[in-house]
């Protein structure tokens, strides 16, 4: 019997039972959400479950989480509880959503305006960076910040890419935003570009700050849809 928190995971209805390197399909049956059973033959060595984590943002404050456990019973199986204990620690969650106005420069995509929105509830801590990567064939990007507590670093080039980064030097309270701009010669808003030359904007969070960072799904953005199709409108409003 498998017990898990159905608010956090989706479990595939088929489990793979393994014995001596051979795999066999077994069907799961649910008695209630988060509780399912599977019948397996003797001498099974491994059970392979298909599990997918759900995207919870912005409703990830679930309260008490149900611990995952797997228990085997039957005359051919010893009772083997396998609990995965939950570790509870104080948290100070904060989050980032990135947005951008996109443009085309000689057929290559570049961001013209980048907005870092602090979605709270706590402030985005100092030490976070925003990185911009674009094709090295595109005109050189020059970054600037409208906020005195952020710093734009010079453009760098390596192999087939060029980059610009912005350092957040002071905390950004929840609900506030910071705007970065990039000047690129010949850039034109709303122009089309080839898909193999799209730019990428992403938040770089130091390892010691990641434990409190919310998974917003907007920490990395590009001027394409999830399926890889070009956006028809490259504005901040369209990509929010």
Image: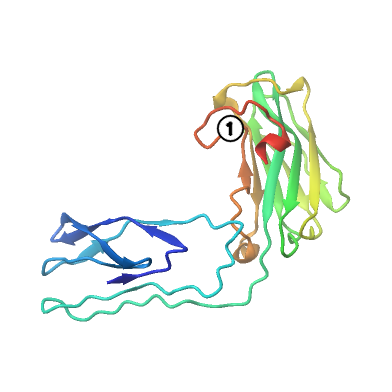
In the rendered view of the protein, which quadrant contains the C terminus? top right
- What sort of colour scheme is used for the picture? rainbow
Q: Quadrant of residue 15?
A: bottom left
Residue 146 in picture, x, y percent from top left = 86, 44
From this view, report whether residue 133 is shown above or below residue 47. Answer: above
Res 156 visible: no
Q: Quadrant of residue 100?
A: top right
Q: Quadrant of residue 124?
A: bottom right
Q: Residue 1 versus residue 159: which sits nearer the camera? A: 1
Does 135 sit left or right of 121 as displayed? left
Residue at the farthest bottom position: 79
Residue holding disc 1: 224
Residue depicted at x 80% and y 37%: 181
Res 27 visible: yes
Residue depicted at x 42% and y 60%: 9
Name the element at disc 1: loop
Residue depicted at x 60% and y 66%: 211
Does 178 sit left or right of 38 as displayed? right
Residue depicted at x 51% and y 77%: 87
Residue 142 in picture, x, y percent from top left = 79, 33
Does 127 sit left or right of 39 as displayed? right
């Amino acid at each position: 019997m498998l017990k898990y928190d159905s608010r956090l995971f989706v479990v595939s209805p088929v489990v793979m039972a393994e014995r001596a390197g051979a795999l066999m399909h077994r069907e799961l049956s649910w008695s209630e959400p988060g509780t399912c059973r599977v019948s397996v033959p003797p001498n099974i060595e491994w059970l392979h479950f298909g599990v997918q984590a759900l995207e919870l943002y912005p409703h990830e404050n679930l309260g008490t989480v149900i611990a995952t456990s797997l228990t085997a019973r039957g005359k051919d199986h010893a009772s083997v509880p396998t609990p995965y204990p939950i570790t509870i620690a104080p948290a100070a969650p904060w989050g980032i959503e990135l947005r951008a106005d996109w443009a085309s420069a000689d057929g290559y995509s570049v961001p013209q305006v980048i907005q870092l929105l602090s979605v709270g509830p706590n402030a985005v801590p100092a030490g976070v960076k925003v990185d911009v990567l674009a094709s090295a064939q595109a005109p050189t990007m020059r970054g600037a910040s409208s906020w005195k507590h952020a710093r734009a670093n010079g453009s760098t080039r390596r192999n087939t890419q060029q980059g610009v980064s912005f350092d957040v030097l002071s905390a950004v309270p929840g609900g506030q935003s910071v705007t970065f701009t990039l000047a690129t010669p010949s850039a034109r808003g709303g122009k089309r570009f080839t898909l193999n030359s799209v730019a990428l904007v992403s938040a770089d969070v130091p390892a010691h700050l990641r434990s409190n960072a919310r998974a917003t799904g907007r920490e990395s953005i590009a001027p394409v849809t999830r399926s890889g199709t070009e956006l028809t409108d490259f504005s901040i409003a369209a990509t929010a």
